[in-house]
Each structure stands twice: as structure tokens, then as C-alpha cells.
Image (tube, rainbow, N blue to C red):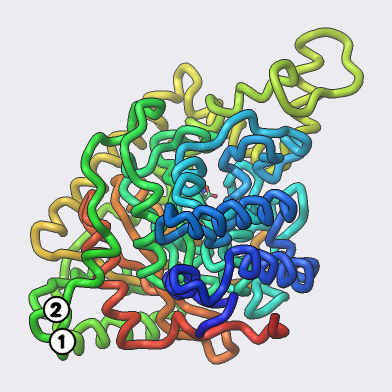
Amino acid sequence: MGGPLDTVAGLARQLAAREVSSVEVTRAALDRIAALDHALNAFVNVDGDGALAAAAAADAARARGGAGPLAGVPIAHKDVLMTAGLPTTCASRMLATFVAPYDAHVVARLKDAGTVLVGKTNMDEFAMGSSNENSHFGAVRNPWQPACVPGGSSGGSAAAVAARLVPAATGTDTGGSIRQPASYTGVTGLKPTYGRCSRYGLVAFASSLDTPGVFARTAEDCALLLGAMAGPDARDSTSVDRPVDDYAGSLAARPADPSRPLAGLRVGLPAEFFGDGVDGEVARAVDAAVGELRRLGAQTVDVALPRVGLSVPVYYVIAPAEASSNLSRFDGVRYGHRAAEYRDLADMYRRTRAEGFGAEVRRRILIGTYVLSHGYYDAYYLKAQKVRRLIADDFRAAFGRCDVIAGPTAPTAAFRLGDKADDPVQMYLNDIFTIGANLAGLPAMSIPCGFTGDGRPIGLQLHAPAFAEARLLTVAHRFQQATDWHARAPALPPA
Ligand code: GLN
């Protein structure tokens, strides 16, 4: 593509060749945000001065010869990740004026790699939602169709990448919040293995599920960013001490037979991902994408995930349970909102939390408190934990017969704003295909694979065994070398 709207890999090449400077690219991103984001609402904060200073520093480092490949590439972070000295709001009134005292581990890693932070992206409050309608700062619009949602909870990051405001952005995925918005906005989204990227500095929603990851236009760009973000961190006890693969290098490796680059790959197709309940246009696009994988040399095998249908009820017990505990820290004492008037301490807690949290967050806290309470713990929380293990066992058994598992990312393409806002159960059912990877801790991606007749993007989801990100990214990359769905852009004014 060339120019400031290029991909991460393209910008890295242009920057290395000194065809553009980081200041020029960063200014172009800031100008585009200023021109377009009033209609999208993808950003909750833009740090123009900080971005230009970081860009100048990246240019200076490059002039000295001390710059890595990502130096000077502008990116955005989901506003659930702590960014030292900048507001970190989680799109909640509770944290509307909170300034983070330190960087999240993945933020620090990307900063060390020289990326330029242009701003923080909008999201569902505390990452609870599938439409980005649960934000204290208002809904985000889908760049392809402004009447539609961009998906959630990382809807701002997805919309920002889809609209070419930034070439890449971070997200977090607890139950699908990277993959589902990637699918709805026609971008590439990667949820790594649980433990691959540290959760330090990620404001906790459901700690056993929360996973930092990335949005970009291509699998190649996701590989570059994951390489910088991944790695052990002693400050997150679930971070895994295991060497980081050379993701970008594995994509660059030449296949033995270039006309069949996926020869030898076994793609598992679970009947549970291809049954009723999947919209017809989505099913057709995903079938065609599977056909493309076959043309590239892959062999398809039928596999079964018999208990994955239970993943929505299991998740909506476990995630709220963990959320109710994690969110108890917002008490009006240590940080965040505090009610202006109150009678005593208990009244201060009550009013602070009633004022600070939106409706969906309060609903989750109530459900979580209920399922953890004496008498219900065994019936709900403990039972859900047992079924969670069975779902993980299903994936393990399936991966005995295949190398990746394919299916749709979501049952439908992007829906209209307001369509599900009054029906939480309908909203929750939208996560049916994404939650399994979180419950089992597996890496998964969504890559663009088509459009509905009226122009809404459709995503193909790929799962891989734990720590097989290089395999996942390679399959996605081969697909993208043979197709151009990921290269299509929504009709927005040129920068
Ligand atoms: N949509 C799911 C929820 O509302 C997932 C959110 C996420 O992955 N953060 O909880």
C-alpha cells in the first residue's frame, strides 16, 4: 500500500529504508484520528504531544542505528491496559479521571520495542460486553456500517485498525473480546495462549481468562507485535516461563511446495461450529474459507467438541464470579470515583459503587456474588469449574486428530446498535464460538474471510493447541497470501 496508511510490516520497511520518518507517520495517524474519530468514537484519549515526542525519539534512535523493526510504528492500547502518566479508564465512570502510575507489562514491552502510543481505545466498561455499547464514553461505530456495532469489548481497538487510524492496537480477550470485534470489523485479531503475555497492569475482569493480545490488518503484523509482547514476567504468577518463538521468522520460512503451502496440515471441523444457529451468509463464507485452506493443501477432518455448547453458561458463572471479587477493589477509598455525599462508611461504598459502575457491570457483580455465596457455590461455581475442565478435555482430544480447528468467529456478522442492548442473554449467546478458547486457555485468531451481501465483514476463527501461536499465525498468513479479504478497507475519506 505504501505511505502512512501501510501495515505494520510495510511501515517497518519504509521506516528502515528512511522513506518516511516516524514523526510523519505519527502525524498522519493523529490527523486521521482528528478527521474521522468524531464519527467512530474509537478513542477515549489521544496523546498527540506524547506521541510526537515518542516518534521523534524513535527517529533519533534510528539515526543512531539503535532501532528495532517496530521503532516508530504508531499503535493504540485498549483503555484497560495501564499506561504510565496517561488516563486509564476502562471506559467506566469509576476510573474516568484515573491516571495510571505504571505501564502494563505488554505496554512496557511494546514501548521498549519503540512503538509510538497515540492513544487509548474505547471499550465495554471493564471489558464486559460484546458490542461496545456498555461504555461510559458512548458506543463505538462500526467503520463499515455506522448503524452497526464494532463488536466488543475491544471495539475501539478493532474500529481504529479497521478505519486505518492506526496499523495495530492491543486488546484483551476474556471470552472473545479480540476475535469477535476483529470479525465484525474485518481485521485480524489474535488471542494468545493464556500465560503467553503477562496480565500485569491489565485491569482485572476475570483473571483466569483475561488474555492480552493484538489487532492488526494481517497475521504478519500480529506476529511482529506478539514477538514484542510475549514473554515471562515475574509479576504475573500465571505468566509462563518458556522461550518466545520467532513468530515473524516462521511466517517467512518457504514452504516445500509453494503451490500447496499448507500440505500436511490437518484442519479440524467440529460439527458443533457448523450447525444451526449460524447465519447463512456467515456459514457460506466460512465454508468457502475452509475450501481455500484445502486448495492450499490442507486436509480437513471431522472432530467433535461435544461439551463446547455448555461454554456460554459455564463462562457466565465463572467470569462474573471472578469479576465480583476483582471489582471489590473499587471502593471509593484507594482510587477512582467516590460519592460526594454519604452518611457513613457503608453508605459511601454503596453510593460510590452504584454511581461508578454501569448497569452491565453491576449485573455481573450481582451474578458473581450470588454464584459464590454459601449454598450456591457448589451448585454453580464448582459445577462450572468441572464443566470447564471437560471442555478443555474436548479440545485436547480434538487436537489428537488435527493441527488447527476452524469455524466461524461469531454466529452472525455485526448487528445494529440497540438490537441486543435490552436482552443480555441474546448478547451472551453471541460469544458461543469464542469462549471455548478462553476456558481451555488456547490461542485463537479471527481473520477476515468474506462479507455479507450488505457489506458487513465475516471472520474465520482458527484455534491451535497451547503455545502453537507460530502454527496459527502461519496458517492465517498462508490464507492471507492467497486471498484479499484482509486488504479491503471501509469507504472512509482518504487521509
Ligand atoms: N463478551 C464477553 C463478555 O461480555 C467477553 C468479554 C471479553 O472477552 N472481555 O464477558
Residue 346 lies, with reference to residue 382, above or below; the image says above
| Residue at x 40%, y 38% (from the top left corner) | 198
The local secondary structure at tag 2 comes to loop
Q: In this view, does 331 lie to the left or right of 476?
A: right
Residue in the foreground of this view, choosing between 378 and 2: 2
* Residue 131 shows in the view: no
Q: Quadrant of residue 10?
A: bottom left
User: Residue at 21% across / 63% down in the picture?
Assistant: 471
- Cα distance between the residues tagged 1 and 2: 5 Å
Circles 1 and 2: CB atoms closer than 8 Å? yes
Q: Is mark 1 within 8 Å of ligand 1?
A: no
Quarter of the image containing the C terminus?
bottom right
Task: Residue 361: give x, y in percent of width and height.
Answer: 65, 39
| Residue toward you, 396 or 443 | 443
Q: In this view, does 468 lie to the left or right of 1?
A: left
- Mark 1 surroundings: few (<14), some (14-19) or many (≥20) residues within 10 A: few
Q: What element carries label 1?
A: loop
Q: Please, is residue 318 above or below residue 49 in the view? A: above
x 68%, y 61%: residue = 42
Residue under label 2, please give it: 255
Mark identifier at residue 151: none
Q: Is residue 104 visible?
A: yes
Q: Residue 329 at what x, y percent from top left?
A: 62, 22
Residue at image mark 1:
258
Neighbourhood count class around disc 2 (C-alpha, 10 Å): few under 14, some 14–19, many 20 upward: few
In percent of the image, x 69 and y 66: which residue is there? 27
In the rendered structure, the answer to whether residue 310 lies left or right of residue 464 reads: right
Q: What residue type is labelled 1?
A: Pro
